[in-house]
Image (spheres, rainbow, N blue to C red):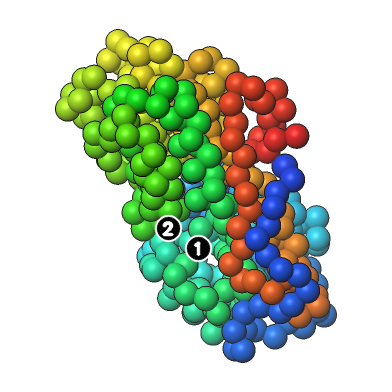
Amino acid sequence: MNRKLITGIVAGSVLAVTAACGGGGDTGSDDAPNPDPEAVEGGYVPVISVELANPYWDTEAETARTALEGLGYETDVFQHENDPQRQNELIDTAVSQDAVAIVLDPAGADESIGAVQRATDADIPVFLINAEINEEGIALSQIVANNAQGAAAGAQYFAERMGGEGTYVELYGNPTDNNAPVRSTAYEETLAQYTDMELLQRETANWSREEGYQAMQNLLTAHPDIDGVLSGNDEMALGAIAAIESAGLTPGEDILVMGFDGSPDAVAAIEEGKLLGTVLQPIVSATEMLVEQLHTYLTEGETGTDQEKQAVDCVLITPDNIDRYTTFALE
């Protein structure tokens, strides 16, 4: 069957970082698949991302596709839209298509464990990007942004721009994604030192611009005197900005908004004075690093790092450095 015509599967369309990883060792469990360099040469490696309409995940997927094709692999890009059942179907299809490895941005830290295990049991190594699962030893690599470090930097900048006082609300990401509570906890811990800043309400908006808009409308109704918005990602922040404008207020003046991700739309909003700043997740370099580890494992039998779970540091983007910004990277 032609992989390009698989029914129901939706095909998809940096900066220097510090990797919290060691060097030279093997990773994975004792039951990890055993690679055969001759068998995997030019093999099929599907890329399964989250939602390709989101520029962050689209960049992730296209970076993986480009890197894999550059190494001679055959690849397709798919999306599971944070649906664990859809993810299961895509993993099962990859198994049936004799994939030599899988690149996956998982649909939930707990919800994805079974899918990764099934691929591993079928002797297909899985490499996780952007989000982790709550188990080690079944995926070969799990590479994520250093969310706690990035969120702390973002919250510190937000507090400074707020003058260390005032009321604010928080837009929270998808609760099944470990990135959401990690960022929220770092926000809370960083702002705890600012006793004159008050969190009025935390609202879940699932990383979505539309849900961010709706949540912000509700928050403005409940708290008409909000001074600031601390968002778990850029899409929710951009939705909040739209809601603030719809209410006849001026983002960047009446209400200060802070983002996270480093998307092109967020950087444009910073240039327009509507967004204070954003925390850049280096998804381009992180994805390239993941593909390099995948290729090393398939050709040499080890990933080249002794840590399965690895983190890459984030970078704060503000009006002071946006002139060095390229798509999800800082030159």
Circle 1/circle 2 CB separation < 8 Å: yes
Q: What is the quadrant of the N terminus in the image?
A: bottom right
Vertical placement of residue 162 versus 151, above or below:
above
Q: What residue type is labelled 1?
A: Glu
Residue 272 location (% of width, % of height): 53, 15
**Residue in the foreground of this view, choosing between 176 and 68:** 176
Residue 22 location (% of width, % of height): 71, 68
Is 314 on the left-hand or right-hand side of 39?
left
Residue 127 location (% of width, % of height): 61, 67
Element assignment for label 2:
loop
Give the residue at the far left of this rendering: 222
Residue 45 appears in the figure: yes
The image quadrant of residue 289 is bottom right
Element assignment for label 1:
loop
Vertical placement of residue 75 versus 63, above or below:
below
Q: Residue at x 57, y 56 (%)?
A: 144
